[in-house]
Amino acid sequence: MKKRFFLMEFTLILFALTVHAQDLKTERVVSLDMLEKVKDDIQKNYYDGNFHGVNLEENFVKTRELIKNATSSDEMTDFITRFCYLFEDSHLYFSPPKKTLSVDYGLNLLMIDDKTYVTKINIESDAYKKGIRVGDQIHSIEEFILDRQQYSVLLRHFFLLQPQPSLNLLIIKPNGNKYKINVQAKIVEANRFLLEKRERELKIEKYEEAFNSP
């Protein structure tokens, strides 16, 4: 009997690994196709024929190889996103297909004079319960400093492209005191049959507007 259960368990493990491998293969094909479409779109429509000094073809080949060796769909998405970041152009970015899971950290951020501040917070959120308030400065997210150069990149990464179940923040209170706080996100199961395209576009516009604020 034990031997039978062992064989059944072993078979289930092999089945799960096979399904995962097949899913990853599908994700890889889709990601490579998206990368090629992104490159073609840039090549045809980008306003600067020199692409801000970026070697489009060379970096496309490098990114394609990275995707071929990636071990997760999130990693593949990240590589395409980095490909777009090479241009250092806030109007050029990659918005991947909507995921069925989304997260809400319970706070809104805005950059003012090269510093990032909390402008709105949900009083029912973990962030509020742990002492974060409107007017607090967010100095860093996951040890990445929120300066003007990184602000748009980091917010797009953590709030739109690859939301995390929790974030490690370094906050500075108005009196100068610093605190390291781990903020748990509220995880929401989205309806996979609704595209919610306009909602995503509005979020992107909001963060771009915040980035370009004086």
Image: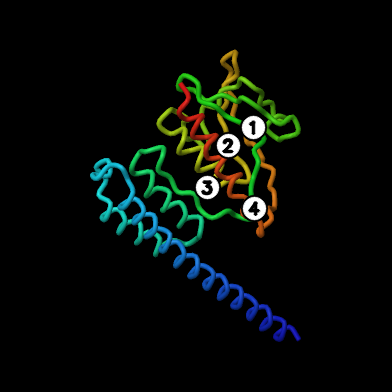
Separation (CA) of disc 2 from disc 1: 14 Å
Q: Position of residue 177 (x, y in %)?
A: 59, 18
Is label 4 in a helix, a strand or a loop? strand
Q: Amino acid at mark 4?
A: Leu
Identity, as a three-letter code, of the amino acid under mark 3: Leu
Upstream in the sequence, badge 1 or badge 4? 4
Which element is circle 1 on? Answer: strand
Task: Give percent across and percent down for residue 129.
Answer: 73, 30
- Give the residue type at disc 2: Asn
Please tell me in which quadrant of the rendered image residue 212 appears: top left
Residue 105 against residue 133 in the figure, above or below: below
In depth, the one of 197 and 210 nearer the eye is: 197
Q: Which mark is residue 161?
A: 3
Instruction: State the CA–CA distance, disc 2 to disc 4.
Output: 20 Å
Residue 87 disc label:
none
Going 34% across and 55% down the picture, which residue do you hit?
A: 39
Q: Is residue 164 left or right of residue 8?
A: left
Residue that numbered label 1 is attached to: 107
Residue at 64%, 32% (x, y): give it.
107
Mark 1 is on which residue type? Leu
- The earlier-in-sequence mark between 4 and 3 is 4
Residue highlighted by disc 2: 168
In primary-sequence order, the first of circles 2 and 4 is: 4
**Looking at the picture, how far across and down is residue 35, in whole percent?**
39, 58
Identify the residue position indicated by label 4 in the image: 101
